[in-house]
Amino acid sequence: MTTILLTGGAGFIGSNLVRMIAGQGGYRIVVFDALTYAGNIENLDGVIDGSSVVFVHGSINNAELVHATMEQYDVDVVMHLAAESHVDRSIVSAAPFIETNVTGTLVLLEAARTFGVRRFLHVSTDEVYGTLGPDDAPFSEQSPLDPTSPYAASKASSDLLVMSFVRTHGIDAVITRCSNNYGPYQFPEKFIPLMTLNAIEQRPLPVYGDGRQVRDWLHVDDHCRGLLLALEKGGTGEVYNLGGFGERTNIDVAHEILRHTDGHHSLIEHVTDRKAHDRRYAINATKAQTTLGWVPTWSFDDGLKATVEWYQQHRSWCDHVRSGEYRSFYQQHYHRTL
Ligand code: NAD
Ligand code: DAU
């Protein structure tokens, strides 16, 4: 049986991916996660069984532990999702992004090379391409790297490190670059869960600037299927863009969430814009469609409705993850009542 070392498996995308792979069978999964504010072991409730899914608590920056884990479980492949992932936090403080996203990725690459893993799947983002104007063609894999935020710069750096290990050391790595995900277990500092909870709780929905920025929304299940296909069928040293064909302005999504929650549209509050806010992301996913056979199945309308229902039904999870560090970070830096 193939053993996957899956970093960041207690986070949003990682926990959905672990659930999907465990449900399908055929792999042993070693979840490796530092459990930062964004990682919750509860996201894996009912999945960790100590044999086909095991959990190792630790940081990818701990080279000794990474090596020991690869040896102990005789790891075949790495799916690397662990990251600091929130743009706003990277604007407040970039150092943790360099530490985890760049140095941590380097630690994993060195371990993968030394141990001789068969394949390294690096989960990246469309933000490495920068921003688009309203009439620009969507990002393709050939688009130049032009990151805006410290988060995006850290992800672009990690992509370049991965490519350098393919070229220099001959490791077998594949990179995916995905658009904005949404779905269950997304930490409620990101746009869709934040707006949903505020709408449910009848608190203001803080829309940055004019709210006309565009994101291309992809359901997390579709992303996870794309990651498995890239792991199984992707070419060495290849990059695959994954997008949802779901371009929407933020203000339209906020209104849609208010419709699903019977919230009053006057709850929308335009607040100070994000610094250097990328105006539009859009993805050309033709390569993944034609070479991996990947097609997203969720429509944004159905996916958003199901996601809002999930948050309505999981209020205690929301209260749990919104306590502590999360609350104090936003009060200190954004002066928001949460
Ligand atoms: P997330 O913030 O929800 O989860 C990140 C996970 O990584 C958490 O469980 C956290 O505990 C863990 N982690 C952080 N630092 C760590 C460290 N040093 N060692 C071990 N674990 C650590 O993130 P997400 O939204 O699930 O994103 C997962 C990956 O997908 C990231 O690499 C991100 O850049 C990428 N991505 C996300 C999106 C999106 O829309 N969410 C889109 C494209 C790409
Ligand atoms: O495109 C992929 C990226 O998508 C991932 O790499 C990142 O990890 C992920 O966080 C996401 O980045 P964004 O910055 O696009 O996502 P976020 O949910 O933070 O914001 C989405 C849009 O909503 C963006 O235009 C900013 C806006 N926004 C966000 C927040 C948190 C608001 O208007 N108000 C808010 O309070």
Image (cartoon, rainbow, N blue to C red):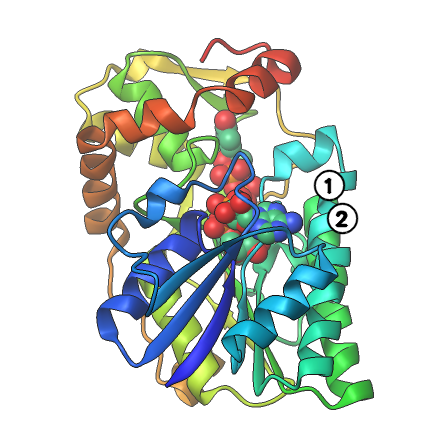
How packed mark 1 is, by other alpha carbons closer than 10 Å (few <14, some 14-19, many 20 or more), is some
Question: Which numbered disc covers residue 96?
Answer: 1
x 79%, y 87%: residue: 169
Residue at 42% over, 31% down: 188
For label 2, being within 8 Å of ligand 1 is answered yes
Q: In the image, is residue 97 above or below residue 230?
A: above
Residue at the spot x=35%, y=11% of the render? 203
Q: Position of residue 189 (x, y in %)?
A: 48, 31
Mark 2 and 1 residues: CB-CB less than 8 Å, in contact? yes
Quadrant housing the N terminus: bottom left
The residue where tag 2 is placed is 99
Q: Nearer the viewer, residue 228 or 267?
A: 228
Question: How far apart, in angstroms, are the residues tagged by discs 2 and 1?
Answer: 5 Å
Residue type for callout 1: Pro
For residue 320, above or below residue 115:
above
Q: Which image quadrant is residue 200 in?
A: top left
Q: Closest to the observer: 23 or 32?
A: 32
Residue 267 position within the rendered picture, expressed as x and y whole percent measured from the top left: 34, 13
Residue 91 screen position, x and y as percent? 72, 33
Mark 2 closeness class: few <14, some 14–19, many ≥20 residues within 10 Å: some
